[in-house]
Image (cartoon, helix red, strand yellow):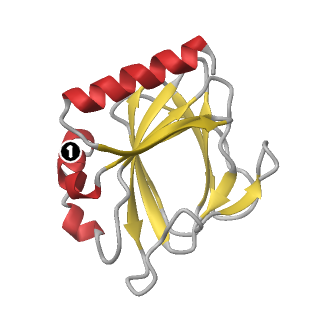
Amino acid sequence: MSAEKKEIFDRVEEMLGTQGFNIAAKDDTRPWGGFFVIDENQAQDFANQYFDGIDVESLKIGGKLSPKILLVAPDARLSWQYHHRRAEIWQVVEGTVGIKRSNTDEEGELKEFGPKDQIKLQQGERHRLIGLQGWGVVAEIWQHTDASNPSDEDDIVRVQDDFGR
């Protein structure tokens, strides 16, 4: 792992600890960066901190919200993807990130987002998070769209992926 990547992961981990969050999982091995998963019991605290107090009960029609902090490296792209059983809400915490969106498999135009910008992705909407000049830090929560079959990490349809996944 590069010193720069280790430094940002350490800094974000310390920030989350200072904010009182319990980290349920950490993955710093992704080729595009990685993420922290926050304890599900702290979903409302997470929403209060990063999403202007959005009521998580209104999102929680089934299963978990999977509160996460995504870290995307400069010039790296997550897969062009969509989900069958969830919508997602992203809030840029730090840095500037690029996001492409579309309702078809054709990638939409790149739009830049900075701190405090909130992006609501619909279930089935194609999307891609892109690191630009520096590291981007993005808070994410899921909105499940199928109460009888909540979304999980396997609910990803990759249309295109730079890493052959």
The residue at the point 51 percent across, 69 percent down is 123
Task: Identify the residue position indicated by label 1 in the image.
Answer: 52
The residue at the point 74 percent across, 61 percent down is 105
Q: Residue 5: x percent and y percent?
A: 56, 20
Q: Residue 140: x percent and y percent?
A: 40, 48
Question: Which one is nearer the viewer's eye here, 27 or 45?
Answer: 27
Whether residue 69 is situated above or below residue 133 in the rendered picture: below
> Image quadrant of residue 150?
bottom left
Whether residue 46 is situated above or below residue 157 in the rendered picture: above
Q: 130 left or right of 122?
A: right
Identify the secondary structure beneath mark 1.
loop
Q: Residue furthest right?
A: 164
Q: Few, some or many C-alpha atoms within 10 Å of disc 1 (few <14, some 14-19, many ≥20)?
A: few
Q: Do we see residue 95 in this rendering?
A: no
Q: Quadrant of the N terminus?
A: top right
Q: Residue 17: x percent and y percent?
A: 25, 30
Q: Amino acid at mark 1?
A: Asp
The residue at the point 48 percent across, 40 percent down is 35
Whether residue 54 is situated above or below residue 125 in the rendered picture: above
Q: Residue 58: x percent and y percent?
A: 23, 69
The residue at the point 46 percent across, 20 percent down is 8
Please state the total of marks drawn on the protein image.
1
Q: 21 left or right of 139?
A: left
Q: 163 left or right of 44?
A: right
Q: 18 left or right of 125?
A: left
Q: Residue furthest bottom?
A: 148
Q: Do we see residue 117 in this rendering?
A: yes
Whether residue 145 is situated above or below residue 75 in the rendered picture: below
Q: Residue furthest top?
A: 3
